[in-house]
Image: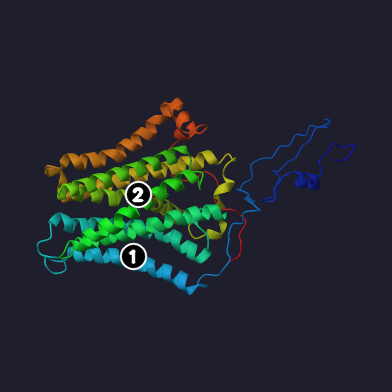
Amino acid sequence: MSENTGVIELEEVALETPQYEMPVSSEHIVESTDSTNTQEQRWEQPSEIPRKDSEPAVVKSEQPFSNLGKDGGRISFIIMALAFQVYIVFRALQPKGKMMPAHTDPLVTKTNIFLGIWNFICFLGGIAPTCLIQTFYKKWTAPPFNYPTKKFKTDIIWLHVVPAVAWFTFASIQIYTTGLHSWAWHRFNGLAILIPVFAVFNFSAMISCFSKLSPLGAHVQFMEILLGLGTFIYFVMGAGFIAFKDHLGHKICMNVLIITALGPGFFRCLRHTRELVTGRLFKVDRYTNYQDLPGTKNLRNFRDVESTYFVLAFLLTDAFTACALYTYGVFTTEKAWLGYFCLGVPAFAVLFGILLRYFPRVTEYMFPGQSQDFNWSFALDYNFPVLTTDQTRL
């Protein structure tokens, strides 16, 4: 500081404050009073979210297809997974006895159609885009945001991604085995593979939820916990029904489980559709880092948008489940109560999450300092720029 003017030199400010890459703007103003140890600084909100130098937008240690075994294998898996869903639906649409046994239960045939379509939609729109971005840009994202790049955080991502993909794969195989002449493969895959895979998948989802890889807020975190609890209930009920040789109850619960477990995939479907429509999906080099949001005035709107899409994903997933169960004819059977129960759980979870805003003491107890996250507002898109002005050449 100069002795007489009392003005802070920009170079001194730069040394005293963390460095950010910001657009040069006349809006950034620094003022000071001539007090002994008191300085007053005023910074107006920049028009773009600044990116911290320590966390670059693109972490790219290798070029796409520099490892043909890994990159080519990932793309091949995506293609085969989608083709497998198409085959499951195609097989079920053929006349009886042509590709599936003639004695196949009509409910099982319809199950192949509905679950094949649902898996195809969720995988194509929810899982494939992030896998392709990871293949080409070598980073994990939730468009239009980047996940943290620290090793501990990326390990958690892998810890959840691998069981999630494994669950999708073996659940699809389980659907396929319902159309075989022998149920031996269905029983083997369910007992020996699918049970432990689901256990790891659900557990890893809770680890990902509590590790706070993204600042989605307490409301979304609460909904994720209810989702994990709901899928666990469906799984246990389905296993219980088959243990007592109640095949209809087992089929209903397993159908609802497979649809609901891919609810987060459909949540990403909705997000990716928004990013595609707004033209931001393919601007990967300008994605904002998740860790740049906390502490900014944009965090409130960000959490409003995420809560909106999570609730929409819950309700639309439940609507698809209702359509499937109605087509199966479940509501005209003695297990109609089970169908209504399975549909009521997600609806109750959404309503409960909304009503919690009127009980701040409860939310403050469950999520200290985050009760305001339950006062979210409906918002389909962000009201702030989510793409940075800084672009890293690839």
User: Which residue is rendered at x = 56% and y = 57% of the image?
Assistant: 286
Q: Which of the numbered marks, if any, corresponds to residue 81?
A: 1
Q: Secondary structure at mark 2?
A: helix
Q: Position of residue 141 (x, y in %)?
A: 50, 55
Q: Which of the numbered marks, if any, corresponds to residue 263?
A: 2
Gap between marks 1 and 2 measured at Cα: 18 Å
Q: Secondary structure at mark 1?
A: helix
Q: Is residue 280 visible?
A: no
Q: Quadrant of residue 180?
A: bottom left
Q: Is residue 150 visible?
A: yes
Q: Position of residue 83 (x, y in %)?
A: 31, 67
User: Which residue is rendered at x = 13% and y = 56% of the image?
Assistant: 106
Question: Can you say which quadrant of the picture contains the N terminus?
Answer: top right
In this view, 69 is above or below 184: below
Residue at the left extreme of this rendering: 103
User: Which residue is rendered at x = 77% and y = 47% of the image?
Assistant: 15
In this view, 217 is above or below 368: below
In the rendered structure, the answer to whether residue 238 lies left or right of residue 372 reads left
Question: Can you say which quadrant of the picture contains the C terminus?
Answer: bottom right
- The crowd level at tag 1 (other Cα within 10 Å; few <14, some 14-19, many 20+) is many
The residue type indicated by label 1 comes to Ala
User: Which residue is rendered at x = 35% and y = 37% of the image?
Assistant: 350
Q: Nearer the viewer, residue 321 or 280?
A: 321
In the rendered structure, the answer to whether residue 301 lies left or right of residue 172 reads right
The residue type indicated by label 2 comes to Gly
Q: Which tag, 1 or 2, sits closer to the chain's start?
A: 1
